[in-house]
Amino acid sequence: MTGFRVLPYGDRALLAEFDSPSAVIGFRNKLLGKAHPGIRATVPAARTVLIEYHPGMIERSALIRLLTECAAHDDVEAGPAGPLLELTVQYDGADLDAVAAEAGISREAVIERHSAGQYTVQFCGFSPGFAYLIGLDPVLRLPRLASPRPRVPAGSVAIADEYTGVYPRSSPGGWRLLGRTDAELFDLNRVPPALLTPGTGVRFMPQ
């Protein structure tokens, strides 16, 4: 696997850096499959994975060798490592027609391409329950809005750059809105509170 390096991150963690989102997913899947008791947590992000470990259970040099071994496998499965969830979507977003015009395809083709995708949660951030999903059709990979909206309704299904995602609550946002879902993305009374966690597979089903 190219574009990989390991950096120190305090005395109980290492940071693995990659040059693509799919590499992050594949590496983390491989590392989780090792199930080493000395690894306490893996925290994926856009191009990195933070690995927290117990120094008494694995030496740093041994962990670096393990990480390098996991990164060296080009055949690592980069798809979902967790369950597959289906989210029903009403494709009536405020930016649907603009996305179609900019992509040079029809409104119906935007819906077809977006709902045909098999997505994986790469990491979470921005707000509680907000997941960054990879697997977006290249034709739909458009930049964020030049001017973010002051309010995006909860449940909005949106795209930005290489990602798609769902706003778990009403908030400002600059992603392009394709539709909306009634799924409860974040609930403090649920374990875990976030419906979409790293490794979860997602399909969007047109309503």
Image: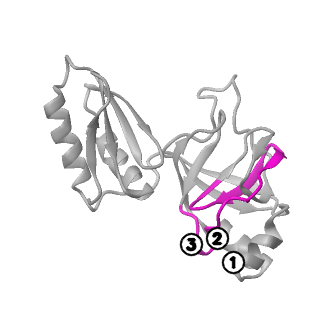
Q: Amino acid at mark 1?
A: Ala
- Mark 2 and 1 residues: CB-CB less than 8 Å, in contact? yes
| Dot placed on the residue nearer the N-terminal end, 2 or 1 | 1
SS of the residue under disc 3: helix
Q: Compute the Cα span from label 2 to label 3.
A: 5 Å
| Residue annotated with mark 2 | 140
Which corner quadrant holds the N terminus? bottom left
Assess disc 3: are there few (<14), some (14-19) or many (≥20) residues with their C-alpha within 10 Å of its C-alpha: few
Image coords of residue 58 (percent x, y): 18, 25
SS of the residue under disc 2: helix
Is 62 covered by the magenta stretch? no
| Residue annotated with mark 1 | 103
Q: Amino acid at mark 2?
A: Leu
Point 77% across, 78% down: residue? 101
User: Quick check: can you spot residue 78?
Assistant: no
Image coords of residue 69 (percent x, y): 19, 48
